Image: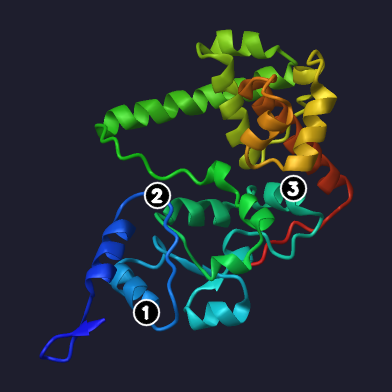
Amino acid sequence: MDKTSSNQAVLTSCQTKGLDVLERQGNVFLTGAAGTGKSFLLQRYLAGRPSESFPIVASTGAAAVLVRGRTFHSFFGLGILEGGLDATVVRALRSGKLINRLNRACCVIIDEVSMLSGTTLKYIPRPLFVPPSTKQEPPNERQKVGFVRQQRAQRIVRLIKEKVSLANIAEQCGVKPERIVLYIEKLIACGAKFDLQYFTSNIAERQQISDAFENCGHDLLKPVFDALGGKVPYDTLRLVRCVRYTEILEKADNSKQEDVLYF
């Protein structure tokens, strides 16, 4: 980095370009040799930004102390991964504290990301990490939309308990079936419990899809889609994933695992 006549550190031309990239939306991998000013650049980027909106996480407790943040597993509610990754993620998504923390975060900075395995990173509970909408609506209109969605969600819960088919639920709610599945995902993430087995009883590839999720994980659909040769539609995969989430939750409850998260 350069220094002005007043001995105040300023960005080099390379760091200025890096800062410009950081200001954009999307994932950024910041790297460089020791002493090139990575920490300085990050501090400049975070200056004046609230820590709740721009949290810093690290792979270990010691590293977290150094960056004045918290551990990756703590921030994302993964704890010690009791019961396996899938069960841990499902439990995490039932935590109100985690939901609020993720929704407050505009950006998450991961220090020494190379120290985390690809498998762990894949299981970041992103289905509930929904940034606030930038669309400005009049307060009355926003309240109206929220009320309609709440009423629809309640109707979906009631119809599922009555074992109504997915197509009929969609028809009664006035939306497409794939939209109903998205509602179900969010309801499960908020702690709702369903018996969804009847949704997939007529899916011939049910076992093959389950095996693919077992091998590829549940966070991303693309690896499962590829593992099945691209022959199973994404909407079907999403539905089967919902069923598997409920099965994982049920197993966790039956085994009386403690629903403890580490914050």
Percent position of residue 199, x then y: 75, 18
| Residue, disc 2 | 26
| Residue, disc 1 | 36
Tag 1: Cα neighbours inside 10 Å, few (<14), some, or many (≥20)?
A: few
* Vertical side of 120 occupied by 60: above or below: below
Whether residue 48 is visible here, answered yes or no, is no
Percent position of residue 29, x then y: 45, 60
Report the residue at 30% width, 27% height from top. Answer: 141
| Residue, disc 3 | 86
Report the residue at 50% width, 28% height from top. Answer: 150
Quote the CA–CA distance across marks 2 and 3: 26 Å
Q: Secondary structure at mark 2?
A: loop
Quote the CA–CA distance across marks 1 and 3: 39 Å
Whether residue 79 is visible here, answered yes or no, is yes
Q: Are marks 2 and 3 in contact (CB under 8 Å)?
A: no
**Along the viewing direction, whichever of 55 and 114 lies nearer the viewer:** 114
The label nearer to you, 2 versus 3, is: 2
Tag 3: Cα neighbours inside 10 Å, few (<14), some, or many (≥20)?
A: many
**Along the viewing direction, whichever of 46 and 157 lies nearer the viewer:** 46
- Looking at the image, is mark 2 or mark 1 earlier in the sequence? 2
The label nearer to you, 1 versus 3, is: 1
Q: Secondary structure at mark 1?
A: loop
> Is residue 96 found left or right of 207 in the rendered image?
left
Color theme of the render? rainbow
**Along the viewing direction, whichever of 258 and 74 lies nearer the viewer:** 74
Report the residue at 80% width, 20% height from top. Answer: 205
Percent position of residue 206, x then y: 81, 23
Percent position of residue 119, x then y: 68, 54
